[in-house]
Image (cartoon, rainbow, N blue to C red):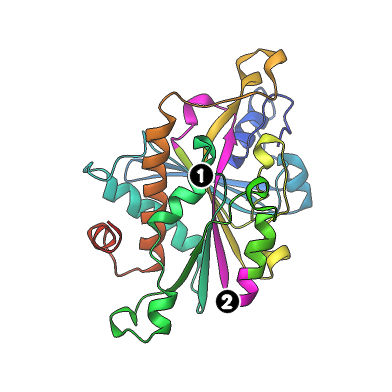
Amino acid sequence: MDITGKARTDLASEAHRLLKNGRVDLSPLPGLETEEETKNGVSLFRVRVLDERGAQTIGKPRGNYCTLEAERFYPRGDGRFPALAETLAAEIRAMLGAADGTTLVAGLGNRDVTPDAVGPEAVRFVFPTRHLRAAGNPLFADFADVAVCAPGVLASSGIESARQIAALSRELRASRVVVFDALAGAEPEKLCHCVQLTDAGIAPGSGVGNDRAALSRESLGVPVLAIGVPTVVDAGCFGAEALRGWFVTPKDIDESIRCASRMLGYALDLALHPGLQVEDVSALLE
């Protein structure tokens, strides 16, 4: 959402920086709380939107937002992969909280459009256990109950992804929903270098001005955790006003999506099944 007159961004951390830039008044923005820290070399910036005043200030719904910034999303074979995956998993676990019942994980986006493929690619690395537990397999008795879907996009299915997820959530009696999606950013250097977690839900397509039905606690009736990676930036950010509304993406987007998607999937597996290590996830999935 473009709330600064400068750039469109889905990231609460970027929106906050854009709002603060150039302000002489150093007091906190109304209705917002922020916190910064570093863990395992990963920068974390948290924004809490406290009330309607804060929501109007930053242009985002009430809730908690956490952005993790890293040098890059390392490939699975890189020795730095486990530390980053575990750091992300800890933040996911903290925001999800404890819950019994089924966790429904949905990968939003279009697998055939690389910058939009984060969601459907990430769920490939999420280990589904619901059918195994339902069958009474004792090997998975201590695992969380997890179901996975990739609903596709309206143009390919004729059905809003939010409607599909809502129907599945009701059918499975899910206790919570996790959604992966691609986001739009405002700072080119942050593309494919950070992850945003939020319990405020998400409106698919909002980052590129193609808002669809929202996925949130209000719409689904259960807690929703949205996990997204910025993959595109409005070309207007480069000072070419005539290009505003055109979106650009990094030249290495294919490799970036592969690495980011694996990282997201692994981190969620570690968060949902606390006894697992990165090596265990690899054994189960790859």
Tell me if residue 98 is in the magenta stretch: no
Q: Which corner quadrant of the image does residue 283 belong to?
A: bottom left
Residue 159 rendering spot, x and y as whole percentages? 69, 56
Residue 141 can be seen in this image: yes
Q: Is residue 40 above or below residue 201?
A: above
Tell me if 253 is positioned left or right of 285 in this view.
right
Q: Which residues are magenta?
A: 168-193
For the point 65% across and 62% down, which residue is it? 164
CA distance for labels 1 and 2: 25 Å
Tell me if residue 179 is in the magenta stretch: yes
For the point 28% across and 64% down, which residue is it? 284
Residue 28 can be seen in this image: no
Question: Is disc 1 placed on a helix, strand or loop?
Answer: loop
Question: Is disc 2 placed on a helix, strand or loop?
Answer: helix
Q: Which residue is nearer to you in this view: 241 or 105?
A: 105
**What number is the disc on residue 111?**
1
